[in-house]
Amino acid sequence: MADRAIANAGVLRGWRKSSYSNDQGGSCLEVLDDHPTGIPVRDSKAPQGPALIFPSVGWTSFVTAVKDGSLSA
């Protein structure tokens, strides 16, 4: 089974911040495209901290559900 976390996400390059983020220091996520084992996701306020790796299919389903409003609180 592939690792599902990266202890120090700062060792990877190419992170992109959510288009919904701003300069006010709010809660933001960054994702890394083209990782061989899935989609790494990290907290933008802690770039040297850990990242979780989600399976590509699961991440795509999550993003689609957020965009179409099908997730409930």
Image (spheres, rainbow, N blue to C red):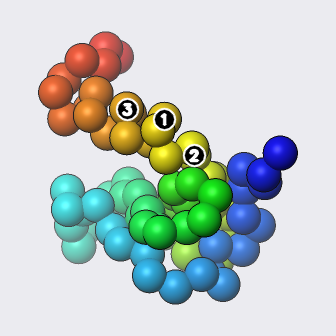
For marks 3 and 1, give the CA distance.
Answer: 5 Å
Q: Residue furthest left?
A: 68
Residue designated by label 2:
54
Q: Residue at coordinates 43% horizontally, 75% vertically from top-left?
A: 15
Vertical comparison of 70 with 59: above or below? above
Q: Are marks 3 and 1 in contact (CB under 8 Å)?
A: yes
- Which quadrant of the figure has residue 40? bottom right
Q: Amino acid at mark 2?
A: Phe
Q: For the residue carrying disc 3, how many other residues have a C-alpha within 10 Å: few (<14), some (14-19), or many (20+)?
A: few
Camera-side residue of 61 and 10: 61
Dot 1, how many residues are within 10 Å of its Cα: few (below 14), some (14-19), or many (20+)? few
Question: Residue 68 in the image: x percent, y percent?
Answer: 16, 27
Q: Which of these two is toward me, 37 or 20?
A: 37
Residue 58 numbered mark, or none: 1
Amino acid beneath label 3: Ser
Which residue is label 3 attached to? 61
Q: What amino acid is labelled 1 in the image?
A: Gly
Q: Is residue 19 left or right of residue 60?
A: left
Q: Does residue 22 appear left or right of residue 73 in this picture? A: left
Local secondary structure at mark 3? helix
Between marks 2 and 1, how big is the CA–CA gap? 7 Å
- Picture residue at 41% right of the left edge, 58% below the top: 29
Q: Is residue 72 above or below residue 53?
A: above
